[in-house]
Amino acid sequence: MSLKSLIATGTKVWLDGVEPGEIKKNRAWGVTGATSNPTIVSKIIESGYFDGRIHDLLLGEGSTNEEIAWELDDELVKGAQQVFLPVWAGTRGNDGYVSFELDPLIEDSATGLSHESRVKRYVQLGKKWAAGHKNRMIKVPATDAGLEALEPLAAAGVTINVTLMFTVRQYRIAREAIWKGALRRQNGLGDFKSVYSVFVSRVDSYTEQHLPTLSQHAQGWVGIDNAKWIWRENEEFWRGKGLRLQQEIVFASTGVKKSGVPADKYVEAFAGAGIETNPSLTNEAVERSKKIYSRHIDQMPPQDIVNEIDSKLNIAEMEHLLMEEGIAKFAQPQRAMLQYIANQRSEIVTCERV
């Protein structure tokens, strides 16, 4: 019942995952959308869920390991989209989306792509994977190349979820680029929708590891403080624009990473507005609890904590390190997934030779 209580505060709750069973369960709880990323898809594929499908694709004509991986990713997101399509229709495009993340290896230094090539690749793939989908968002990371790709993608009518975002600097660049692109859309702004995913718990993990001078009183508040300031600015910017659909902040990375911390720490802190994209375990913990949620989104941390954070946190250093870590965290599972498919291919070849 508590997910319904959370939703009643004004929060949209999405699932950070696209596993079909989890999608069905979370939808029954009232969850209205979902997000995907390379880690999520890799875990599903490496679990053996798609082994039969991989076998069939490998026996087909000329499919590369990369093509098979993206085919399966597309199938997972499509399946989730079907579940949430009635939500999208019922809200006239304001909710009910599933996010599809673009290739994380674009940012991998091992690929050797230039900045210009990365931008071009984001635009090309964004248009490709968005085509023909009503309730699909394209996730583009807030890297230098990803940010530069936002304006042409928005101008082309692609619905965007800016991901891997940690700072107000990234948010402002992303927002301005998307708004400029949206103003160039041939079909106007009637169906213009964008969201901006601010990662929360990773910020608190960063301060625990890299900011020992921050008092224990302030540790654990930085992610919340940071995300709420960005949410406030987002609300102020879009107010008065006369848009039919909301341009929203997604509170991402909301699963707690420290033992002894309540599972709903971030869930409760952001209750009342925006979108929370929560891991399945977090949504399950909230659903099983008997807590009645109320609006907390407007409540900032105590002023002494805010002052300490402002005086001790080097935002630029934090962004640099978290972006490096984030790129690596998504590239690694993508490569693991490709290796898994390659191993399946080798098994088929071996069997054929026996």
Image (cartoon, rainbow, N blue to C red):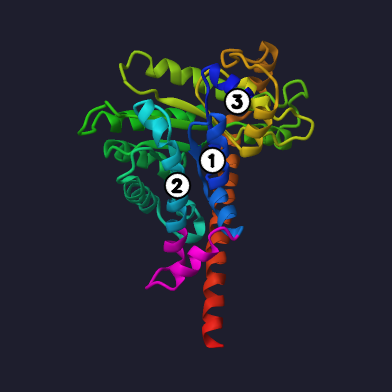
Identify the residue at horizontal 44%, vertical 67% (top origin): 57
Q: Could you tell me which secondary element the residue under label 1 belongs to?
A: helix
The residue pinned by badge 2 equals 79
Identify the residue at horizontal 56%, vertical 76% (top origin): 347
The residue pinned by badge 3 equals 3
Q: Judge the density around disc 1: few (<14), some (14-19), many (≥20) Cα neighbours within 10 Å.
A: some
Compared to residue 13, the image places residue 301 above or below, namely above
Identify the residue at horizontal 44%, vertical 36% (top origin): 84
The residue pinned by badge 1 equals 24
> Of discs 1 and 3, which sits in the foreground?
1
Q: Judge the density around disc 3: few (<14), some (14-19), many (≥20) Cα neighbours within 10 Å.
A: many
Could you tell me if residue 266 is visible in this image? Answer: yes
Q: Amino acid at mark 3?
A: Leu
Toward the viewer: 321 or 88?
88
Q: Amino acid at mark 2?
A: Gly
Span colored in magenta: 48-69
Residue 162, image quadrant: top left
